[in-house]
Amino acid sequence: MKPIGIYTVMGILLLVAAALAAVGLACLATLTAPLHSPGYAAEFLCPPGSQLFSEWYRATFNEPGERTLSVTCVNFDGEPVPGNQRNERTLFKGVRLYFPVFFAPLLALGAIGLAGAAWLVNFLRSKA
């Protein structure tokens, strides 16, 4: 049996490190989805024929400089409509919809970045 090479081990470790970083960032992106991509969130938060409207406003109970986020489903006339029931099924649908969208690019960028950093360290060590 041929032993595993150092470059194979480094590649596996880089991929694992990139995956761990990407999981955390993808979870954060999934939790904040209504802020940066309301179109995705509307698919599981709002009924068909409506869209998600989000805005920041200053309430009387806010501290100076603090704002509150309001997320509402509205029909195409701008009238508020009741959103879908939120339970474990809609939560799972949201995670299933969002997580791959954010995880795959973050994993690729992290792996490329870490591979580049490993190459740079290896290059600098060989010059020393």
Image (spheres, rainbow, N blue to C red):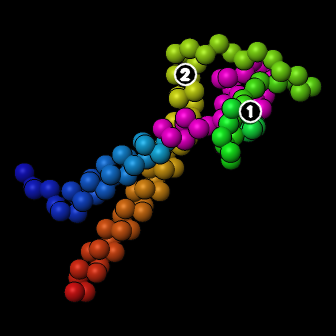
Residue 5 vs residue 111: left or right?
left
Queried whether the magenta region covers residue 47, the answer comes back as: yes
Queried whether the magenta region covers residue 3, the answer comes back as: no
Q: Secondary structure at mark 1?
A: loop
Q: CA distance from mark 1 to mark 2?
A: 31 Å
Q: Is residue 112 above or below residue 23?
A: below
Q: Which residue is mark 1?
A: 60
Q: Is residue 12 above or below residue 41?
A: below
Which region is colored magenta? 27-54
Give the residue displayed 65% in from the left and 23% down from the top: 44
Measured as percent of width and height from the top left, residue 5 is found at 16, 61
Residue 33 vs residue 53: left or right?
left
Looking at the image, tell me whether mark 1 or mark 2 is earlier in sequence order: 1
Q: Identity of the amino acid at label 1?
A: Thr
Q: Count neighbours of disc 1 (C-alpha within 10 A) and say few if under 14, some if 14 to 19, many if 20 or more.
A: few
Q: Which residue is mark 2?
A: 91
Q: How many labels were placed on the picture?
A: 2
On the question of residue 38 being in view, the answer is no
